[in-house]
Image (cartoon, rainbow, N blue to C red):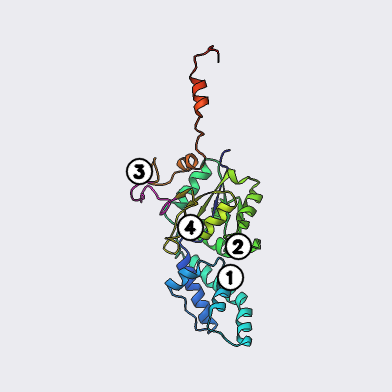
């Protein structure tokens, strides 16, 4: 069964957005005079919780016990905090401070030129996706993707497979007809649970995770101008960057003939069994 679509996560996969997210969270906390500051090491741990609002709820539950009234107030504040954080993040991205990762735009163009459809399966908000795509890819950014599935459209976020199942449903495809691109263990588990062959490109925020279930792990997709160290010859065979053609070979390799089939094929024409 051939590949008809590529399904991309956004944060960390298409662009290394997490520092911008961390900064936006801290600005929102400052706006609400909470006195919270998430450092890089702390935020790296918090990223194990998928979803921005979920991350804040998790953090509140981890705080030194506060009175029930204050605890209830903080929980009720989460939607407004997250909305404020989203506004800060969108502003940072719209200013062009978050570029696409190496090779992403090239690879998207290669896939489209080959007639492959593109989709997004992300736990971030539609506003965040819109800001990133339009800033990095221009007016064509949204048009490149046949389906954009966002976090609030499903009940269970990654590592649950729901967001990938939703994207596949809208694409009208079986899991065997698509490939997922992720950067985190939770994202990879979601894609694999949905039945997708998965490429993982970790970042500082996710490196060191367990990616043993991935079909292919690379530091980035790579680009002719900036080839990947040790490639070809390490994980890739055709170039120092992942090409669409090589992805197709890896994700859906040609079946190896069985010994019986090979023996049958080797018999002279007209010979009797």
Give the mark nearer the N terminus: 4 vs 3. Answer: 4
Give the mark nearer the N terminus: 3 vs 2. Answer: 2
The residue sitting at 52% across, 13% down in the picture is 269
Q: Is residue 218 left or right of residue 255?
A: left
The residue sitting at 35% across, 43% down in the picture is 233
Q: Are marks 1 and 2 in contact (CB under 8 Å)?
A: yes
| Residue linked to disc 1 | 54
Cα gap from disc 3 to disc 2, whole angstroms:
36 Å
| Residue linked to disc 3 | 233
The single residue placed furthest to the front in the displayed view is 273
Give the mark nearer the N terminus: 1 vs 2. Answer: 1
| Residue linked to disc 4 | 183
**What crowding class fits label 3: few (fewer than 14 Cα within 10 Å), some (14-19), or many (20 or more)?**
few
Give the mark nearer the N terminus: 2 vs 4. Answer: 2
Question: Which quadrant is home to the C terminus?
Answer: top right
| Residue 157, numbered label | 2
Main SS type for the magenta part?
loop
Q: Are marks 4 and 3 in contact (CB under 8 Å)?
A: no
Residue 9 shows in this picture: no
Give the residues in magenta: 217-234
Comparing 20 with 2, the one in front is 2
Cα gap from disc 1 to disc 2, whole angstroms:
10 Å
Cα gap from disc 4 to disc 1, whole angstroms:
19 Å
Instruction: Tell whether position 205 is magenta.
Output: no
- Relative to residue 248, is residue 180 depicted above or below? below
């Amino acid at each position: 069964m051939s590949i008809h679509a590529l399904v991309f996560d956004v944060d960390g996969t298409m662009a290394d957005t997490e520092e911008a997210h961390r900064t936006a969270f801290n600005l929102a906390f400052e706006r609400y005079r909470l006195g919270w500051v998430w450092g890089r090491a702390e935020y790296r741990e918090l990223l194990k919780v998928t979803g921005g609002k979920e991350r804040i709820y998790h953090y509140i539950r981890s705080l030194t016990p506060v009175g029930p009234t204050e605890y209830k107030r903080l929980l009720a504040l989460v939607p407004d905090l997250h909305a404020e954080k989203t506004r800060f993040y969108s502003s940072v991205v719209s200013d062009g401070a978050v570029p696409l990762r190496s090779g992403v735009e090239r690879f998207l163009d290669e896939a489209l030129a080959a007639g492959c459809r593109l989709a997004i399966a992300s736990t971030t908000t539609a506003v965040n996706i819109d800001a990133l795509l339009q800033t990095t890819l221009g007016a064509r950014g949204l048009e490149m993707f046949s389906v954009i599935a966002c976090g609030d459209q499903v009940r269970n976020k990654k590592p649950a497979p729901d967001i990938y199942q939703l994207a596949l449903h809208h694409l009208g495809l079986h899991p065997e007809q698509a490939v997922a691109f992720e950067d985190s263990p939770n994202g990879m588990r979601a894609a694999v649970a949905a039945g997708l062959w998965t490429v993982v490109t970790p970042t500082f925020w996710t490196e060191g995770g367990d990616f043993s279930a991935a079909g292919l792990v690379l530091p980035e997709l790579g680009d002719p101008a900036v080839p990947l160290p040790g490639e070809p010859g390490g994980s890739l065979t055709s170039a120092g960057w992942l090409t669409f053609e090589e992805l197709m070979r890896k994700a859906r390799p040609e079946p190896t003939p069985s010994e019986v089939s090979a023996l049958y094929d080797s018999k002279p024409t007209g010979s009797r069994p």
